[in-house]
Image (cartoon, helix red, strand yellow):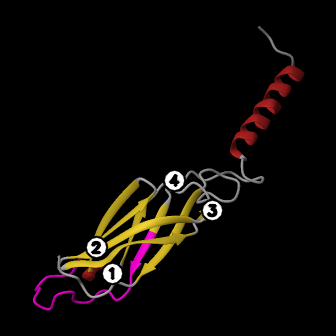
Amino acid sequence: MKTSRAAHASRVALTAVLVGALAVGCGGRACDTADASNLLRVTVAGFPRALDSASAGPDLVTVQVCLATTCTSAQFDGGRGNSVGMELPFTSTEPVDLSILVSGTTGVLLSPTTVRVTPRSFSPNGPGCDPTVYRAELTVTPAEPSRP
């Protein structure tokens, strides 16, 4: 079946418009495809430092954070810095209350306490492009270890 030049030109133009529309999704530019997750960065002030002078190894710190009924924990040692990132189910930039517990190899450093954080929205692929995730930061200053 033969096609007229005008019909062929129309299909080529339509195809170009459709391809351009698919590639342009964020304010006239193509969206990247980076993925990201909701994240809380917890920094424990005063590290690295020895929690127990009798300990020959690095200090192992466990941070547990709960948002409503969802809890997560992560560990780090004083030799690798003083912060840890944890995924939490933030859903907006509204302030949220978190329950946090920090413990070390020698005991509890920060008893369970409630803190309020305000997540910030972040779009790794640029404004108007998915995904939009929420990030927050928190610095805690533990006391000397309490022995169980």
Q: Which residue is mark 2?
A: 76
Q: Secondary structure at mark 2?
A: strand
Q: What is the three-letter code of the residue carrying label 3?
A: Thr
Foreground residue, 18 or 56?
Answer: 56
Disc 3 versus disc 4: distance between alpha carbons?
19 Å
Disc 2 versus disc 4: distance between alpha carbons?
24 Å
Q: What is the three-letter code of the residue carrying label 2?
A: Phe
Q: Which residue is mark 4?
A: 35
134 left or right of 109 in image: right
Residue located 10% across and 86% down the image: 56
39 left or right of 148 in image: right
**Residue 71 in magenta?**
no
7 left or right of 22 in image: right
| Label 2 close to label 1 by CB (< 8 Å) | yes
- How many other residues sit within 10 Å of disc 3, few (<14), some (14-19) or many (≥20)? some
Disc 2 versus disc 3: distance between alpha carbons?
28 Å
Q: Secondary structure at mark 3?
A: loop
